[in-house]
Image (cartoon, helix red, strand yellow):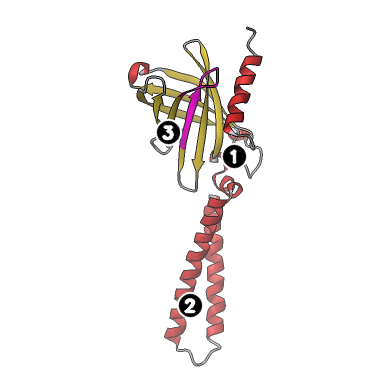
């Protein structure tokens, strides 16, 4: 049973308690006809139930902690970084993951070893489960040439990297396959994504990645 299902049951119990309390109160008023009592109880209880449901969804949308509690191991909202090698050079990627109760979308970009943006991309599908793993489709544009192509990423989320009930996983692996243009069929098989530290801007995150690369470069 999900967290939201438990909340819905709690809301239903609150509504039933309200119906019982209101019915007892109305039966003490002699001037109200039974049909009127029933209508008052019905419409106010329906209104209360809808109001509580809307309030719960609003609170979850407004609070990352509640959203993490709801999604648990699948709470991915935030900035993620990864690195990969292409044509003998190191590249980095930034994923901006937006997430609410029912949807998830990704936008992002790639940078080269000098910190210059070389591509940008966006998700064009919701994550869909295939043989026990999550897959998502992307549209990608190469900045230098302007060429566009597509890719499919398979996500392997690490549930054990979740540090608390109010946070999501901090690590996940991904495999990406490119389609179209001259990279058709090219695979990035060992992508390791890390949740970026909170409080850092994207510019600071990219600078940190570049600095770490240069520190590890013996040349």
Mark 1 residue element: loop
| Outermost left residue | 180
Q: How many marks?
A: 3
Quarter that holds the C terminus: top right
Residue sitting at 52 percent across and 59 percent down? Answer: 8
- Whole-angstrom CA distance, mark 2 to mark 3, is 49 Å
Q: Are marks 3 and 1 in contact (CB under 8 Å)?
A: no
Q: Identify whether 122 is placed above or below 167.
A: above
2 or 3: mark nearer the eye: 3
How would you rate the neighbour count of disc 1 (Cα within 10 Å): few for under 14, some for 14-19, many for 20 or more? many
Disc assigned to residue 31: none
Residue closest to the eye, 109 or 150 = 109
First-in-chain label (3 vs 1):
3
Q: Which residue is mark 1?
A: 168
**Residue 115 in the figure: left or right of residue 124:** right
How would you rate the neighbour count of disc 2 (Cα within 10 Å): few for under 14, some for 14-19, many for 20 or more? some
Mark 2 residue element: helix
Res 136 visible: no
**Residue 97 in the figure: left or right of residue 165:** left
Identify the image quadrant of residue 202: top right
Residue 32 location (% of width, % of height): 48, 89
Residue sitting at 52 percent across and 74 percent down? Answer: 19
| Outermost top residue | 219
Residue segment shown in magenta: 106-118
Q: Which residue is mark 2?
A: 41
3 or 1: mark nearer the eye: 3
Q: Which residue is mark 3?
A: 122
């Amino acid at each position: 049973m999900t967290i939201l299902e438990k909340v819905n049951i709690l809301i239903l119990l609150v509504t039933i308690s309200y119906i019982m309390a209101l019915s007892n109160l109305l039966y003490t008023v002699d001037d109200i006809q039974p049909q009127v009592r029933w209508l008052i109880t019905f419409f106010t209880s329906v209104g209360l139930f809808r109001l509580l449901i809307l309030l719960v969804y609003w609170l979850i949308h407004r609070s990352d902690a509640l959203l993490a509690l709801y999604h648990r191991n699948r709470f991915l909202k935030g900035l993620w970084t990864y690195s990969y090698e292409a044509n003998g050079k190191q590249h980095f990627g930034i994923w901006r993951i937006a997430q609410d109760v029912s949807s998830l979308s990704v936008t992002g970009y790639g940078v080269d070893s000098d910190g210059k943006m070389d591509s940008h991309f966006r998700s064009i599908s919701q994550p869909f489960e295939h043989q026990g793993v999550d897959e998502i489709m992307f549209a990608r544009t190469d900045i230098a040439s302007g060429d566009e192509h597509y890719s499919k990423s398979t996500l392997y989320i690490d549930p054990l990297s979740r540090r608390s009930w109010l946070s999501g996983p901090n690590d996940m692996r991904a495999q990406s396959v490119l389609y179209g243009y001259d990279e058709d069929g090219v695979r990035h098989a060992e992508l390791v994504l890390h949740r970026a530290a909170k409080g850092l801007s994207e510019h600071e995150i990219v600078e940190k990645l570049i600095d770490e690369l240069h520190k590890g470069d013996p040349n």
